[in-house]
Image: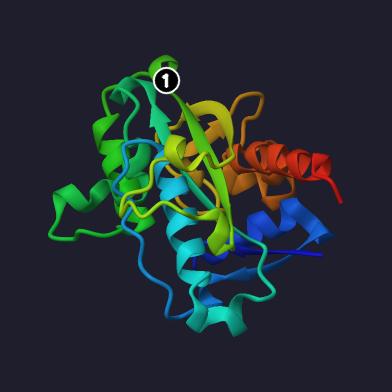
Amino acid sequence: MTTLLIATRNAHKVGEIRAILGGQFQFLTLNDFPGAPNVIEDAETFAGNAAKKAVELARWLSSPQLSTLNSQLSFVLADDSGLEVDALGGKPGVHSARFAAEDSASSGNTPDADNNAKLLRLLKDVPAEKRAARFRCVIAFAPVSQAKIESSSPVCCNEEMELPTFDGACEGKIIFEPRGKNGFGYDPLFVPDGFEETFAELGGDVKNKLSHRAKALEKLKDHFSRLPT
């Protein structure tokens, strides 16, 4: 069975990925590797950030001193995702998790409540018909094998590494106040097309069939099904 390292410590994201990929894989997360490097997500695109995380962690895991830990691992799966709001020119985009940071002294990810509050503040005068938005996700995975990771560049470029990437998007709109207790991030403010409920109201079973991450992961599953056994 293929074992994947999910390159995150976010329990909500891990739960979604596990639920969508199902029993075809075994999973480890960064919580299983407390010494893993903190990869700076400074690329300008979701694909760039996902590729950088996947490659840098795969390179770290392939080092000889970690051979006893990585022997069971096949790939590192990394994703970058976020919210794009048309009325804001596509923001927050790659800055979704740290959207409120520019309004504070924080340089890292900021609490969901702060990010949501900033989004609502920026959209306060935007009418309902102009609040179109989408969640977007790009997944990259890299083999945990030194022979396949030859780039020494400290900043990994997706095209240079030729990593397979898988993308997904979910179209919808931003409402005027948060609703629902499930989900995370901007879920309480996002209503997907064809529904009246927010992602935070729909629950995991529905969300995991139509979300941006679900669509990207389905492409990944299809890719694996085509690989020679």
Q: Is residue 77 visible?
A: no
Relative side of 208 to 146, left or right = right
Residue, x 38% and y 47% (percent of image)? 156
Residue type, label 1:
Ala
Query: At which x and y percent is residue 15?
Result: 64, 61
Relative side of 100 to 28, left or right = left
Q: Alpha-carbon neighbours of circle 1 within 10 Å: few (<14), some, or many (≥20)? A: few
Q: Where 159 sits versus 24, above or below? A: above
Residue, x 33% and y 21% (percent of image)? 87
Residue, x 38% and y 36% (percent of image)? 45
| Residue sitting at the far top | 129
Q: Where 51 sits versus 108, above or below? A: above
The answer to which of 17 and 183 lies nearer the viewer is 17
Relative side of 7 to 154, left or right = right
| Residue sitting at the far right | 229
Provide the secondary structure element on which disc 1 rests: helix
Q: How is the image coloured?
A: rainbow
Res. 86 image quadrant: top left
Query: At which x and y percent is residue 201?
Result: 61, 46
Query: At which x and y percent is residue 1?
Result: 82, 65
The answer to which of 212 and 158 lies nearer the viewer is 158
Residue on which the image places disc 1: 128
The answer to which of 7 and 213 lies nearer the viewer is 7
The answer to which of 120 and 40 lies nearer the viewer is 40
Relative side of 13 to 24, left or right = left
Res. 177 image quadrant: top left
Q: Where 162 sits versus 22, above or below? A: above
Q: Is residue 97 visible?
A: yes
Total numbered badges shown on the rendered structure: 1
Query: At which x and y percent is residue 20?
Result: 73, 51
